[in-house]
Amino acid sequence: LADGASETEVVEIIPELPEAARFFRADNDDVLSDPKVRLIIDDGRHHIKASTRRYDLIVGDLFFPENAGTGNLYSREHFAHCRAALSDSGMMTQWVPLQQVSMDVLKSIMKTFATEFPHVSLWWGTISGGRPIVGLVGTVAEQQIDPRELARRVKLWAPALSKIGWTSPSCVMNHLIMSDAKFREFSSAARENTDDRPYIEFAAPRLEAVGERIATSNIAALGGLPSACATVPVPHKN
């Protein structure tokens, strides 16, 4: 919305949640009151499958894999529906909470995601030691970062980004964990998560009691948390 999106759809399955969101206006910028936002009470997977629209961005929010029924939001079939709903230059981001997945489960999500998207990358989101989050980014077109466009957007979103320590283009680039080739290599031996073989539905809930220890282990396996503003070169556009 801050960057000029003409319309944003928010799909929420719990009818009471939009009302609860209004108690957090200061944190969510009262987004549901924005005239460009269309609130839809529905199951997100059903909505994206049935939609005839094409989207420039689809965000799979922070679903908790430990919750019953959530595993199908990480399935190959769901990711296929999301890819089909993207515009030619569109992007999907799927957030994953590292304190709720083993490394095997994370690799399964990555492998499944990469099966459906021609181009993928993995990024740090929030980098709290106890509740770190990673984002899987998938596109149909090759992922290229224009340094001038990145600088423009960092400046445009400066008030929000500064809250999480992203104060420059180099800060943003420092959160890249894996680009396409490494992403695929890292997850190549994992099993896919499908509707008829729902691995994540049964694997993730077993970790509920050991979340912080799992998070620490996952952070180490991914190379450790980034320092928010370490100097990392912004790539030159070809």
Image: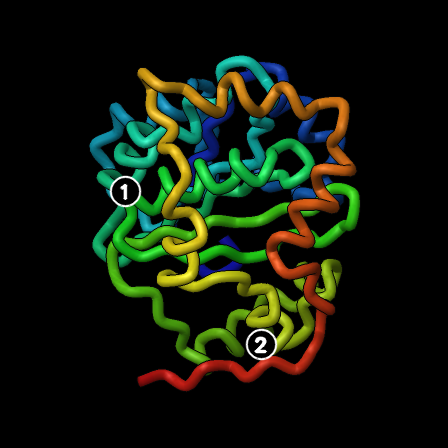
Report the residue marked by disc 2: 169
Is 207 situated left or right of 71 in this image? right
> Which circle, 1 or 2, is nearer the viewer?
1
Instruction: Residue 140: give x, y in percent of width and height.
Output: 25, 54
First in residue order: circle 1 vs circle 2? 1
Residue displayed at 62% across by 52% down: 221
Instruction: Residue 162: give x, y in percent of width and height.
Output: 72, 65
Nearest the viewer among 217 and 82 is 217
Report the residue marked by disc 1: 116
Q: Three-letter amino acid code at disc 1?
A: Glu
Nearest the viewer among 57 and 15 is 57
Residue displayed at 26% across by 29% down: 51
Instruction: Residue 226: give x, y in percent of width and height.
Output: 69, 65
Quadrant where the C terminus lies? bottom left
Q: Is residue 199 above or below residue 52?
A: above
Secondary element at image label 1: helix
Instruction: Residue 96: give x, y in percent of width and height.
Output: 56, 40
Q: Three-letter amino acid code at disc 2?
A: Pro
Residue displayed at 49% across by 55% down: 122
Local crowd size for mark 1, using a 10 Å CA cut-off: few (<14), some (14–19), many (≥20): many
Secondary element at image label 2: helix
Identify the image quadrant of residue 149.
Answer: bottom left
Residue displayed at 66% across by 62% down: 161
